[in-house]
Amino acid sequence: MDGTKLVHMANQIAAFFAAEPDRNVAIEGVATHLKRFWEPRMRREILAMVDSGQVKGMHELVLAALQGHRQNLQPAP
Amino acid sequence: MYSNKVLDHGTKAQESATQVTLQIDGSNVTVPAGTSLMRAAVDKGVKIPKLCATDSLDAFGSCRLCIVEVEGRRGFPASCTTPCENGMKVKTQSKKLAELRRGVMELYISDHPLDCLTCPANGNCELQDMAGVTGLREVRYGYDGENHLTGEKDTSNPYFTFDATKCIVCSRCVRACEEIQGTFALTVQGRGFDSKIAPGPTDFMSSECVSCGACVQACPTATLMEKSIYDQGQPDHAVVTTCAYCGVGCAFRAEMKGNEVVRMVPHKDGKANHGHSCVKGRFAFGYATHKDRLKTPMIRRKITDPWQEVSWEEAFAYAASEIQRIQKQYGRTSVGGITSSRCTNEETFLVQKLVRAAFGNNNVDTCARVCHSPTGYGLKQTLGESAGTQDFDSVDHTDCIIVIGANPTDGHPVFASRMKRRLRGRPGTEGAGLIVIDPRRIDLVRTPHVEAEFHLQLKPGANVAVLNALAHVIVTEGLAKEDYIAQRCDVGEYAKWRTFIALPKNSPEALENDTGVPAAQIRGAARLFASAPNGAIYYGLGVTEHSQGSTTVMAIANLAMVTGNIGRTGVGVNPLRGQNNVQGSCDMGSFPHELPGYRHVSDASTRALFQAAWGRPIDSEPGLRIPNMFDAAVDGSFKALYVQGEDIAQSDPDTQHVQKALEALECLIVQDIFLNETAKYAHVLLPGSSFLEKDGTFTNAERRISPVRKVMPPLAGLADWEVTVAFAAALGYQMPYSHPSEIMDEIARLTPTFTGVSYAKLDKLGSIQWPCNAGAPDGTPVMHENEFVRGKGRFFITEFLATEERTSRKFPLILTTGRILSQYNVGAQTRRTENKVWHDQDVLEIHPHDAELRGIKHGELVALHSRKGDTALRAVVTERMQPGVVYTTFHHPESGVNVVTTENSDWATNCPEYKVTAVQVTAHAKKSEWQKDYESFSSSQEGFLPGTATRGETN
Ligand code: SF4
Ligand code: SF4
Ligand code: SF4
Ligand code: FES
């Protein structure tokens, strides 16, 4: 799926949670949202982007969530 | 008039803690204080003659037919206007009374055409009945005196006539228009003998009349009469059912002759509408028998092929083989389905069951995605349940109403009438305060006897800023209900939110640039709302269809909690749902991440429950949402889609992207009553059934489950639920139901909020508001009464973030979209009724200043450009708009409004941002390229229908 669009959507989620004063809670919020609402192929794709270093324009909370909660977010093959 | 087979109590029921006992014709009767003698008599089985009274209106006391004798009192009081008192002794019949009543009737009849036998009201006319009841045998004055028998007939309204010759000037119509509808379109002109009823100085069609039909229903004679009665005669039986248009969910009596609907009359006992309706539900049902209805299943290999008519079996076999082929080739998750908010709960439940159990994935979504998905998310997060908190009746007890991003008089007309009644107040009592938050000056801001205290005319996209500013004022001026919050809400989260909201950046002054609303107005509105004993918030798609849609819903919940306005009658958070069954389709598990009852698919115990019942494994991962399906289709990983009763090609944003996605599908199965825009891209067409052709239930905006009843056989032979059952069977998955009631029983078994629901109980109670279970066997009008569903109410920090859709030099205006009264959603139904006389095309509303700047004249075709595409519409120059903002609707496919809207969406739910698109408007337009392409594509697709090469969109 269109990677730019996925990053844009993820960034919007991050922008909501960015208002949370506790950074860990914010990261957790982003990760949980992706896990609960994103279909596996969408998560797979955005994780692949992180793996291949295509993180330009990615909100830092998105990156932190994808890296920090990778195991939980990686869909079963 | 209302069917005379239904008992008319003459005056309204009264609520009172005090009871009074009196004697009527020698027997005792006890009634609530305030009840009229007339109503008390009816309770006792005694019908006092009457003409100007009816139980939907306040008593007026003008005809004097209802006079009675009261022991110890002089004269003959009118029983409709005389309240019962303890110990009264009332006589309803005596020689003197009979004589006086006959005298009254004589006067009426001497000025009435005596053509009863050929009158459309024959057999259902109160005047006729009263002549009989009073024993009128002769008219001493003769018929030659001065009279009104030469009056003209006004037939301008497409649905009813006004025949002045038959009018008895009882003013029931005038009062109905005022008290029930709140439009004040009718007046009594002149005095005494010369008085007559008129819709202002014009005919009905050019008047303020909105064609709700309340006057027609109230009229005791044939003066105001449905044209369908002229054409078809009086109905002979009636079935109670539920309107299939908007989320108000009005109950109707479908009055029938054989299998034909003669007229739809709002049901007096309907708890959502209490006997009122709008033009759509009452009159616009003709689409159900329109000649464009699809009657035979059809298939084709490619969308450039003509359609081939096949049997149901062949259609199911082909559809199933395609799904199986595609899943084999591209994988289990390459297919999905879309449920419909216009179909019944049972049908929606079956489509999601088919996708989860037979397709084996969670790729199911519903059109609520594009309207109220943020409501589901936002209210679940804050309050714990994805639904509005009140019943409609609650508005009667409200002291201050906020309407934000909703236009109830157009979108939810029957509820709007109810709200207006509360805003006007009862005679002698004050009405509720009103705060409207909307970029447009919607009708509610100022209508007869209603004026908003505050109209916060914000810039589109600034909802969160305005709500934050309101909350800021409440918190910093010490208006928060701290006791309520301490008791009912999560205090830790409240403290965090409180700190955030009190920050100077959230003050109305700091946000003035973003909101476009003077700070003083926001301060005034905040004080008004916070100081009202009961404050209620009503909202619509102007809240949800934004990139911050979910944040706005949370900000609304924050505002309700901080003012202590959840958990009792008269308050609450009330989403006004667009389509009839939006609430129901969401309840039934139509979202890709939730099983019925809003339980996440990752929850193992819920999955186990469904797996045991359905005999198939349930995927624990969320599926694709509609916009994700489109993206995946374009990307090549999503190949087949089953769409029941939705028109995504017209209703969803960024049309060209949607078209690309639909073209990329290898198998599109569309089930609909018409060849809608989506069907033009389909490979399998399964004819749908209208709400008149099936049994089931709809759930309205107040969580009210109401019965839908089959009054005629399905035109194509199968009801929609039967189609899904047969399709599943062709896929090798059996769902052996013999009646929708069995589907509801399954829903009840599997869903904790529905355990007490059954068709038997619906028959008994009429309708039920969920949750309905052991704790609330008759349902739940008001939610969160003692505690929130989630335990403690949770405040969320709602930072205002401006949308990325910004105006620029090239696109300096903001386009926002909405609805109008006479049309419904994509218009597939209403465009096929006489409602088209009110709105035969979508138009672009523009402020005079913006129009002048561009040399645009009222009525001319103008071009609308956005970053996404171009289209052309006729301009309507109006001061309802604020400068810089233009507005349109999407009821007609050829207007291509969604060619212009963008793919921007709500951060949490992907609900599209229909309400904000940066555009330019230019004068002297021709049709856009898209419109020309659309016309040729559309006409070639219509030509592919067998034997319908000449079929167009005409009646
Ligand atoms: S039109 Fe009907 S309701 Fe109105 S005043 Fe005449 S008779 Fe009464
Ligand atoms: S149809 Fe409705 S709006 Fe029109 S005059 Fe009658 S009551 Fe009033
Ligand atoms: S208000 Fe809604 S439900 Fe009621 S009649 Fe009109 S369209 Fe139907
Ligand atoms: S019915 Fe009571 S005065 Fe007309």
Image: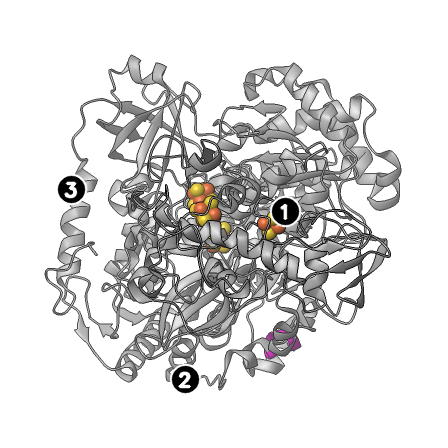
Q: Which residues are magenta?
A: B745-749
Q: Of B112 and B95, which appears nearest the observer? A: B95
Vertical placement of residue B852 versus B728, above or below? above
Q: Which residue is mark 1?
A: B59
Q: Residue at x 60, y 81 (%)?
A: B613
Type of amino acid under label 3:
Lys
Q: Is residue B918 visible?
A: yes
**Are the residues at dot 1 and dot 3 in contact (C-beta closer than 8 Å)?**
no
Q: Residue at x 69, y 48 (%)?
A: B394
Q: Which residue is mark 3?
A: B932
- Coordinates of residue B835 in the picture (x, y in percent): 33, 48
Q: CA distance from mark 2 to mark 3?
A: 42 Å
Q: Residue at x 65, y 62 (%)?
A: B95
What subunit carries mark 1?
Answer: B
Q: Of B831 and B72, which appears nearest the observer? A: B72
Seen as rendered, the residue at the extreme front is B140
Type of amino acid under label 2:
Ala
Residue B441 bears which disc, if any? Answer: none
Vertical placement of residue B618 versus B12, above or below? below
- Coordinates of residue B227 in the picture (x, y in percent): 32, 56
Q: For the residue labelled by badge 3, is the local secondary structure a helix, a strand or a loop?
A: helix
Q: Nearer the observer, disc 2 or disc 1?
A: 1
Q: Which residue is mark 2?
A: B729
Q: For the residue labelled by badge 1, is the local secondary structure a helix, a strand or a loop?
A: loop
Same chain letter for marks 2 and 1: yes
Taking the image as shown, residue B688 lies to the left or right of residue B427, namely left
